Amino acid sequence: MDDELKIKMYSFTVDSKNPHELAKFYASLLKWEIMLLDEEWACVYAPGTNQGTYPSILFQQNPEYKPPVWPEEPEAQQQMAHIDFAVNDLEKAVQYAIHCGATIADKQFSNNWRVMFDPAGHPFCLCQMKSIIESTHFALL
């Protein structure tokens, strides 16, 4: 019997007042599949992987959710996490994200990535990483 502890990432869970709308945004942005689980939960996952085979992004309803302020400000709601997405063409990715419903953060700190906000106000980054995108070891495209 194998008693070795095994831990695998299943999902990254994101709070939202409207999980279905936020899941639709990320499914469009990533060209992933979407599963609406019930009125409080939704999930997006890589196409062809059958939900649960690869890590997913899970969205849970939180009626008290307040978007974080970025960059941080004293006494304001702080971000607790954000997702970085590797892209091969930063400007095209920014325009595509805007088309999907994202907005660009007013403050930027690098020419190699763009801080964006999803429709619920969560920050995420589009990172110029052509070498990673083209790598045979990069699985979730």
Image: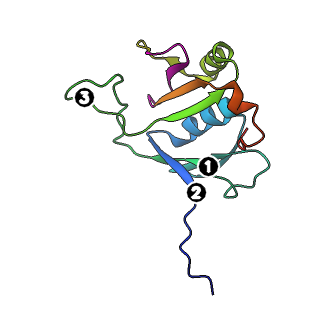
Check residue 114 for magenta coloring.
yes
Amino acid marked by disc 1: Ser
Residue 87 image point, x, y percent: 66, 26
Q: Give the overall secondary structure of the magenta segment.
A: loop
The residue pinned by badge 3 equals 76
**Residue at 66 percent of width and 20 percent of height:** 93
Would you name the residue on which mark 1 appears?
56
How crowded pointer 3 is (Cα within 10 Å; few <14, some 14-19, many 20+) is rated as: few
Q: Which residue is drawn at 44% across and 39% down?
A: 17
The amino acid type, in three-letter code, at marker 3 is: Ala
Mark 3 lies on a secondary structure that is: loop
Q: Which quadrant of the structure image shows residue 98?
A: top right
The residue carrying mark 2 is 10
Query: From which residue to which does the magenta span run?
Result: 109-122
Find the distance from the CA under tag 3 to the CA under tag 1.
Answer: 29 Å
Q: Tell me whether circle 2 and circle 1 mark residues in contact (CB < 8 Å).
A: yes
Answer above or below: position of 96 versus 65: above
**Image disc number at residue 125:** none
Left or right: residue 9 versus residue 108 is right
